[in-house]
Image: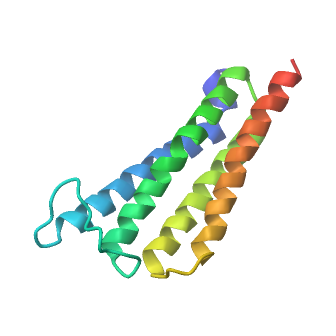
Amino acid sequence: MALSAVYNMPMWGMVCLVILVIAQWLVATVVKASQPGAVPGKIDENLSHDSFVFRAHRTYMNTLENLPAMLLAAFIAFLIGANPLWLGGLIWLYVAARVVHMALYYAIATERNPSPRSYFFMLGFLANLGLVVLCVTTLLER
């Protein structure tokens, strides 16, 4: 059986993650660029959660901050032949958590911590941690 057939579910999760990152980049870029006097690469330091520009930028940056560890763990899991069902489930859990985190960050302007989005941030973190555990357990089974 081809590798792509075995890992179809996790690969679709990764594709959706790439689409999510591009969508967040697009929203953050368009919203910021539409502001009067917008300067490329600079966010007004006086902005806070009451500004959608700030929330869109932070949503995108937060995803980028979490992405390297997730991608590396997923890549290692693919390379070492981790269980495709567990790998797919953890990737999809991560993607779902990031989508809900994004939706809540876009919708709710709050300085409160923890905010509703914090719970989905943690869910994504736990999925990421699960990917690392999957890699370790797969390697130990060899």
| Rendered residue at 42%/55% (across/down) | 61
**Residue 72 or residue 21, whichever sits in front:** 72
| Rendered residue at 72%/45% (across/down) | 129
**Left/right of residue 51 with respect to residue 94 in the rendered view:** left
**Left/right of residue 66 with respect to residue 114 in the rendered view:** left
Q: For the C terminus, which image quadrant?
A: top right
**Residue 34 or residue 9, whichever sits in front:** 34
Hey, which quadrant is residue 34 in on the image? bottom left
From this viewpoint, is residue 41 visible?
Answer: yes
**Left/right of residue 93 with respect to residue 62 in the rendered view:** right
**Left/right of residue 81 with respect to residue 102 in the rendered view:** right
From this viewpoint, is residue 12 visible?
Answer: no
| Rendered residue at 60%/59% (across/down) | 96
Image coordinates of residue 24 in percent, x first then y, are 39, 58
| Rendered residue at 65%/41% (across/down) | 9
Image coordinates of residue 141 in percent, x first then y, are 89, 23
**Residue 112 or residue 82, whichever sits in front:** 112
Judged from this view, the residue extending furthest toward the right is 141
Vertical arrangement, residue 89 with respect to residue 32, above or below: above
